[in-house]
Amino acid sequence: MIKFIFSEGIKNVFRSGFSGLMTVSSLVISLLFVACILIGTDTLETELRKLKRENPITLYFPTSLKSLESEAFCKKIDQFPEVLQLKFISKQDGLELYNRLYHTDVKDVLGKNPLPDAASIQLSGENLSISDFSNFKSKILNLNPKIEIVYNIDLFAKLEIFLQYFTQGTLILSLSVLFVSIFLLINMIRISIFSKRQLIRTMQLVGARKIHIQAPFVLEALIQGVLSFTLME
């Protein structure tokens, strides 16, 4: 009986002809589509995490503070566990950098240095959320509410919302494609069962158990699934 189950299951795969080819093809396309969706979503999430991690937070201290006072604040901020790297930029360093970038001399034009002390901060952690930045911002403002904090938090919030909608949309689309493919597979098996109704009737008359009648068709579906996965690879 086991030999019959395996022989019938394998023969059914080749007997199905064009309908079997279409079913296997649809399964292959569905699996490829879902794989591309998963890879694309993971890549987008990885790039977003990388962008949030590598994009520095810039602090601008009040112009009323002396550089020594600003440096003292930087030393306190550098002790925060969220901080991976902190670089202090004095008023003079900021002025020299600005003059080099824009090929000018601001001090000669204005008669003074209008730039404040600043700091560039890179946060630690692989998966930084918007709440992490909000909490970090609150801790800095608790030190001095006049410190100006510049960061693209709105941009990252919009990107996270886009990624969430994208993930949900692609998940629904993937499930729809899989549902159609499974429906085609079930329909093909039903056609195969209908075409062998006389054989099934004969097996029932001779006392074959239900599992022995169903097993070849289940094996046929398994073979088609494995074949689809193999072709996808």
Image (cartoon, rainbow, N blue to C red):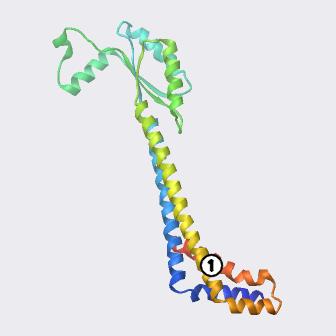
Residue 221 is left or right of residue 25, and the answer is right
Residue name at image x 54 percent, y 21 percent: 79
Amino acid type at image mark 1:
Ile
Up-down relation of residue 87 to residue 184 (above or below): above
Up-down relation of residue 48 to residue 89 (above or below): below
Residue name at image x 58 percent, y 79 percent: 188
Residue 98 placed where, x, y %?
A: 25, 22
Q: Secondary structure at mark 1?
A: helix
Relative to the observer, which residue lies in front, 180 or 28? 180
Relative to the observer, which residue lies in front, 101 or 33? 33
Residue 22 placed where, x, y %?
A: 50, 78
Up-down relation of residue 190 to residue 77 (above or below): below
Residue name at image x 45 percent, y 35 percent: 157
Whether residue 162 is visible here, answered yes or no, is yes
Residue 135: image quadrant is top right
Whether residue 38 is visible here, answered yes or no, is no
Residue 5 is left or right of residue 118, and the answer is right
Residue 13 placed where, x, y %?
A: 60, 84
Relative to the observer, which residue lies in front, 197 or 125? 197
Residue 229 is left or right of residue 212, and the answer is left
Up-down relation of residue 27 to residue 124 (above or below): below
Residue 210 placed where, x, y %?
A: 79, 81
Residue designated by label 1: 223
Residue name at image x 48 percent, y 63 percent: 33
